[in-house]
Image: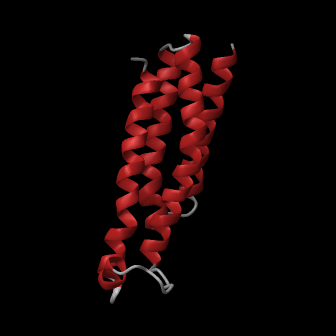
Amino acid sequence: MTQPLLVLILAALLQMAQMLIPGYYMTRTPGGRAWNASPRDADRKPGIEEGRAARAFENHDRNLLLFAIAAFAIHVTGQANGWTGFLAWVYLLARVLYVPAYILGWVPWRSLIWMVSFAAIGLLLLAALV
């Protein structure tokens, strides 16, 4: 298995973990546990951490597709090498750091971390073309 493909699987596991984080914060707010167990017919305003965790999840959801395309392109074209493996790990590390950066409101670090992950995807896509 190539490094980008391995990192893609790990990134998918990160996405699954991120899916649980907003629920964790929801159950800590007053009435959150009951609302979470309900059919959710009525809207509720999320707490700060819950909202940030949900937005971090949505951001990874969008970026994961681009990374998946890059990882598959590298794997299928046989372009996997030390450089593409490094870029894949940079992407994953940045995505892992992005979660607490967003939830804890690390300004401007959250945006810089996102730029690192986005640049890694772009470089992987370019490497697949070479």
Q: Could you say which is closer to the camera, residue 50 or residue 110?
A: 50
Q: What residue lies at 46% left-to-right and 59% top-to-bottom? A: 101
Q: What residue lies at 46% left-to-right and 80% top-to-bottom? A: 46
Rendered view: 13 above or below 69: below
Number of residue marks:
0
* The N terminus sits in image quarter: top left
* 63 sits left or right of 19 in the view: right
Rendered view: 80 above or below 108: above
Q: Position of residue 82 (x, y in %)?
A: 47, 15
Q: Which image quadrant for residue 76?
A: top right
* The C terminus sits in image quarter: top right
The furthest residue to the top: 78
The furthest residue to the bottom: 30
Rendered view: 121 above or below 127: below
Rendered view: 112 above or below 27: above
* 129 sits left or right of 97 in the view: right
Q: What residue lies at 59% left-to-right and 22% top-to-bottom? A: 73
Q: Position of residue 127 (x, y in %)?
A: 64, 19
Q: Position of residue 37 (x, y in %)?
A: 31, 78
Colour style of the rendered protein structure: secondary structure
Q: What residue lies at 59% left-to-right and 55% top-to-bottom? A: 111
Q: Position of residue 113 (x, y in %)?
A: 54, 49
Q: Could you say which is closer to the camera, residue 94 or residue 66?
A: 66
